[in-house]
Image: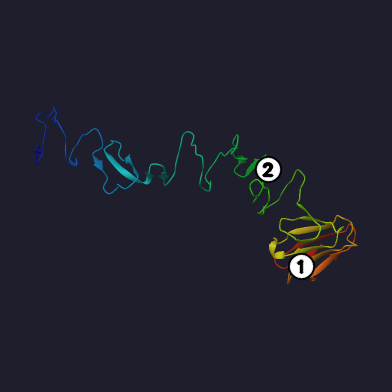
Amino acid sequence: MAYNVLTGTVNSALTTGSLTMAGTFVGDGTGLINTPGPNTVVPDSAADNRIITFTSTSGKSIQGETNLTFDGSLLDITGHLTASSTISASVFFGDGSKLTGIVAGSGGGGGIFTEVDGDEAYTTSSLKVGATAGAGTINGALQVAGSTFLSGGVTHTRKLVTGIYSASALDYFIGANSTAGAVEIFLDASLFLDGQTLIIKDEGGTANTNNITLVASSSQDIDGFSSVVLESDRGSINIYTNGTAKWYLY
């Protein structure tokens, strides 16, 4: 079956009537007017996964949006997203710097912070900075710029030592028990933060018989000495470090 090819202009026979064409219309449609739907596609706007939008109030122009794409599973938006209702997602990626009105969730997986205003938030849950999930081992540092206020007690870590031990940046109280023999505690300032402190206590009460010795790492010192000996029963030593090579008694 062949097509009839027309050139020029086809007009309605009556100015108030219409021209009806049965079958299929073949062509780009760029010269059609007064059609009920879109009749113009913006040039070179088509590309893989672009979502088409109308660009005129008359609904006669459409284009593929560069900043709005959907590949069947991922909707990608470049710009701002506004919603008048709830947005739900199993995972949120981003820095959250523009989020507002964040409140604590209910049930498992909810947020633990409740925002009071732009400068203040609170939590009634335990907060572990740098903690290994489930283990509670602190591997990070909490840094506070400004004043701090604690309305409850403060708990520090305690390590019981009965022999040779290398102090860790996770330590605070080191309880030495030399009942069974002398105790040596090795100190490497480079593993600690500047200003970090340790308190070493003779918990066994036998330091005079079996000394407790603090030994600085190679090329480091404790108030100018390579080692310090605790030899008073029930005595203790308080030290802090500059985080590089020095330990200081206080």
Query: Which residue carries the number 1 mark?
Result: 216
Percent x, y of residue 42:
27, 45
Q: Which class describes the residues within 10 Å of circle 2: few (<14), some (14-19), or many (20+)?
A: few
Classify residue 215 by image quadrant. Answer: bottom right
Sooner in the amino-acid sequence: mark 2 or mark 1 = 2
Coloration of the structure image: rainbow
Percent x, y of residue 135:
67, 47
Name the residue nearer the viewer: 174 or 18: 174
Q: Check the image and report above or below for 66 versus 168.
A: above
SS label for mark 2: loop
Q: Residue at x 72, y 64 (%)?
A: 189
Query: Which residue carries the number 2 mark?
Result: 126
Q: Amino acid at mark 1?
A: Ala
Name the residue nearer the viewer: 94 or 144: 94
Percent x, y of residue 108:
60, 37
Q: Residue at x 63, y 43 (%)?
A: 120
